[in-house]
Amino acid sequence: MRQTKIILPDSEIPTKWYNIMADMPNLPQPPLHPGTKQPIGPEDLSAIFPMALIEQEVSQERWIDIPGEVLDIYSLWRPTPLYRAHRLEKALGTPAKIYYKYEGVSPAGSHKPNTSIPQAYYNKAAGIKRIATETGAGQWGSSMALAGSLFGIDITVYMVKVSFNQKPYRRITMETWGAEVHASPSTLTESGKKILEGDPDCPGSLGIAISEAVEDAATHDDTNYALGSVLNHVLLHQTVIGLEAKKQFELAGDYPDVIVGCCGGGSNLAGASFPFIHDKINGKDLRVVAVEPQSCPTLTKGEFRYDFGDTAGLTPLQMMYTLGHDFVPPGIHAGGLRYHADAPLMCQLYHDGIVEAVSYGQTRVFEAALQFANTEGIIPAPETAHAIRGAIDEAIKAREEGKEKTIFFNLSGHGYLDLQAYADYLDGKLTDYAYPEEKIKEALSKLPVI
């Protein structure tokens, strides 16, 4: 029989996270205080983060131990399988080999628990009773709700309003695990009220939801904040994906020529690629491709500037590719990719030419999602479908050039709670939306001058 699944035993779950900051040729510029515009210190973050996560945020140690209690919970779904997409390869008539790491086997259906579990663990150890957070499509909110239920921490989720309405089953999933969920912008915070005063019909954005969650955490002594992407410690936790994949490729006797991942904040692409980028930095011939929506083209059309991570300007200024912190993208179904900026680590790697980026309209993305579902059997999340589009295009290019290559992408989550998106696509209701250049320029003109 041909090998379709490459599976590792529980004993091969990584016991350390890989920190790419130990190996990057250029580290990101330091985050700046939103008020003073000076580099921030640990004391500036201690109001909303436990010290253990702050230490991980700034660490340049190559390997960071994973706590035993976190490993015990990881074992509920890790190691995740690496699949060889034989049927997709055949349908494409490509000489390329396509592999995908399937993170949808986690209880929350995505890669997000890889960081929600350790974040809840460290907050619990610090005596925190409640965590406030945001969510776009609901996968991060679901994962944080799961972590809260396992560690006995109350979770409050500010869910981007357009996704709150599009994806009721995500909300129900969070509530089933005990979380309190609010459509954002809400009337529960000053930042939410201010947005609604200016635009009562605002569909929301991740930047707005982050503002609300940060404000909530900063104004309650028993509450901390948790973020599902972008920050260094989040990307660190996700490297369990790539570390497992490296062992699985060894078992398969193969190695990627190109790694593809969807990119909204950067966590799933970082998790899959950073352990391999270590090899690239040390001379390995490898391409890494970030795929983003044309309606929120952060890397492909943004500017490399200091900007706030949220709309209200409550978070530290980070050096990153950004479309402007008050940029509100249209309500595409890939809610997890509707963020105005990207992780500073991913942005620095892109700026240095180590990572590439492409963007697609959502109709081509869903076309790829259906082809994948009808060959490999898994209905992917709309976010992940961007990675599938990128992988398919790489395979088609290999066919046209008559070249063998090995393509690896991270199937970061399933789409079984996103079926309204598929209904809209099948009914011909989805349209492509390339964000107007003048709107991007308008948002960028409001960036702080550093």
Image (cartoon, rainbow, N blue to C red):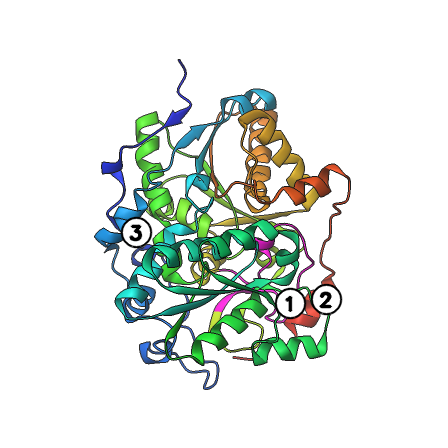
Q: Secondary structure at mark 2?
A: helix
Q: Dot 2 surroundings within 10 Å: few (below 14), some, or many (20 or more)?
A: few
Magenta residues (range): 319-342
Q: Dot 1 surroundings within 10 Å: few (below 14), some, or many (20 or more)?
A: many
Left or right of 309? Residue 439 is right
Disc 2 designates what residue?
439
Looking at the picture, tell me which residue is in the foreground, 30 or 367: 367
Give whichever of discs 3 and 1 has the lower sequence position. 3
Q: Amino acid at mark 2?
A: Lys
In the rendered structure, find residue 22 and report the number of the disc placed on it.
Answer: none
Image location of residue 100, percent across then percent down: 46, 34
Dividing the picture into quadrants, the one containing residue 55 is bottom left
Cα–Cα gap, marks 3 and 2: 38 Å
Image location of residue 39, percent across then percent down: 39, 79
Cα–Cα gap, marks 3 and 1: 33 Å
In the rendered structure, find residue 18 and report the number of the disc placed on it.
Answer: 3
Name which residue lies at 54% across and 77% down: 313
